[in-house]
Image (cartoon, coloured by chain):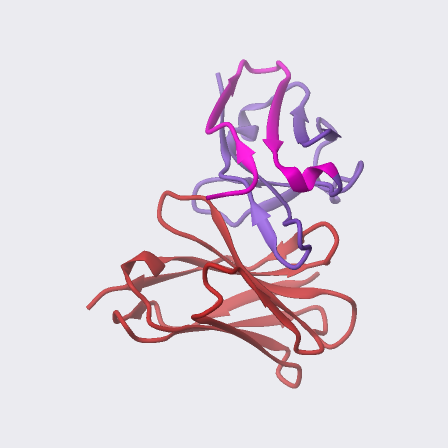
Chain colours: A red, B purple
Amino acid sequence: QVHLQESGPGLVKPSQTLSLTCTVSGDSISSGGFYWSWIRQQPGKGLEWIGYIYKSGSAYYDPALKSRVSISIDTSKNQFSLKLTSVTAADTAVYYCARDDGDYGCEYWGQGALVTVSP
Amino acid sequence: SSELTQDPAVSVALGQTVRITCQGDSLRSLYATWYQQKPGQAPVLVFYGENNRPSGIPDRFSGSISGNTASLTITGAQAEDEADYYCNSRDRTGDRRIFGGGTRLTVL
């Protein structure tokens, strides 16, 4: 069974960088044709796709966040990571990592990590 | 703004059939994926592709597509189906995924 787990600080100050890591177990990031995704959900709002990365390191981002977001992959640790720079209160959200099969979507999700942006 | 449009809320009587719809230009050539999300939980994939349900998803969940509109149908809705439902597809470039705004389903 594939399991994903987000980790990182739950509180980030405005203008700083939000950093989260997703650790994958039950599957190898370096095998298979999957995209490793970040999706967020602001309080009381809908799901927002942030971006994903392929095992090759090729990454794709939502245009609205592209100037501030970076997703990287560490196959040796079976992890992938999210960095979001210059955060504001609007970046307060539950951040999910997920495995995207590239065609249809995400069958496996992490439990989500709440990140609050506050002084 | 989302490029996939969903009704914000839908209700259904217990045991009846409900259709949740999703409209978008990308759906003319791409299938929608549907997620169910209950409060405080991660989304769950409930339907994808032409006619696919992940293991463990009841067969009362089905999907269809016509023109630019995808639909998720729940035949014989149960109390446990009360949740938010999100459609998801790719944008016209194919490089990014997009979500609909979500539909809150209430089972009466």
Q: Is residue A115 above or below residue A71?
A: above
What x and y, as percent, mark residue A45? 40, 44
Magenta stretch: includes residue B25:
yes
* Most foreground residue, A13 or B97: B97
* Most foreground residue, A60 or B39: A60
Magenta stretch: includes residue B13:
yes
Quadrant of res B72: top right
What x and y, as percent, mark residue B47? 70, 39
Q: Is residue A37 above or below residue B100?
A: below
* Most foreground residue, A86 or A3: A86
Q: From the viewer's perspective, tell me whether residue B79 is left or right of residue A59.
A: left
What x and y, as percent, mark residue A83? 45, 74
Q: Is residue B83 above or below residue B106?
A: below
Q: Which residues are magenta?
A: B1-28
Task: Please tell me which residue is depicted at 61% across the width and 15% down the height of the picture.
Answer: B15
Q: From the viewer's perspective, tell me whether residue A109 is left or right of residue B10.
A: right
Number of marks: 0
Q: Which quadrant would the N terminus of chain A be assigned to in this image?
A: bottom right
Task: Please tell me which residue is depicted at 55% across the width and 60% down the height of the picture.
Answer: A110
Quadrant of res B86: top right
Q: Residue furthest bottom?
A: A76
